[in-house]
Image (cartoon, rainbow, N blue to C red):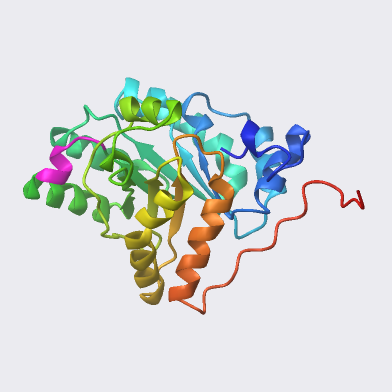
Amino acid sequence: MWTHKEWLGRFLPSSPPAKERLRAYAGWCNAVEGNTTFYATPARDTVASWAEQTGPGFRFVVKLPKVVTHERRLAGVDAQMRAFLDAIEPLGERAVLWTQLPASFGPAGVDVLGRFLRRLPADRRRAVEVRHPGFFTDDGSTSLLEGTLAGAGAEWVPFDTTVFFRTPPASEAEQEAWARKPRLPRRTRALTDQPIVRYLGRDSAEETAEGWRPWAATVAGWLREGRSPTVFLHTPDNHDAPSLARRFHDDVRALVPGLAALPEPEPVEPATLF
């Protein structure tokens, strides 16, 4: 997402026009998760507007439609995928196809996943997020999935909630996330040159920052290896997500001084003397 009511007047203008909201967000961060595409395939003109509002280095990790991943579980979805791929074509190479699978999609479905991934256009980057515990706790299932993903040039996207579930929830937002988010082990192995990480912290900025220290070290290591990672920082309420993302970037830069700084965002309100 690139709009959130708590960001207005802080990270984004108070009343940004619809066609300028992503441009304002892109002043803070250089990648975005396309969660809305899970619920409906956007119009191609809408996607073209996204491309126009962002620079050539901005990355889109767009989630495949729910009908593809959850309802039909990757089978018999040629028509839906053709429509989706046509819609996001204006993003070109900047778009990563993000296949987020339900927790019920386990190791028995890996062959189906492999066939699906191999049918995707060769010039499209692809990434897969799994939530079935077997992929994390059974060595054979882990190896099977890793081999399938590597053979299709796909990345395994970890969703790290270990810090979030370390202590009981302390707010309404944390209680809601406590009931909805998966509890899975942390995974830090990259399969491609563009790994993707999703991290969920706490409403407390300091707890969130303390918890991402292992990721800062891992991402720094990937950069030294020549990889180009993308990291998404979440909290249960996401109130401070843009500034936390920049803080994480600064922590990684402290470990990899050659990493370029993020651009400075434009002021969200006009300067005043009073």
Picture quadrant where residue 86 is located: top right
Identify the residue at horizontal 27%, vertical 43% (top origin).
166
Image height of 217 relative to 38, above or below: below
Identify the residue at horizontal 46%, vertical 29% (top origin).
38
Q: Judge whether residue 123 can be spotted in this image.
A: no
- On the image, the x and y values in percent for residue 141 come to 11, 45
Question: In front here: 249 or 194?
Answer: 249
User: Which span of residues is magenta-colored?
Assistant: 131-137
Image height of 188 relative to 148, above or below: below
**How many numbered marks have been drawn onto this rendered protein structure?**
0
Question: In front here: 4 or 98?
Answer: 4
Identify the residue at horizontal 40%, vertical 31% (top origin).
174
- On the image, the x and y values in percent for residue 69 come to 34, 29
Q: Judge whether residue 15 can be spotted in this image.
A: yes
Q: Quadrant of the N terminus?
A: top right
Question: Going by the image, does 79 lie left or right of 157?
Answer: right
Tell me, yes or no, whether the highlighted magenta stretch contains residue 35. no
- On the image, the x and y values in percent for residue 161 come to 31, 43
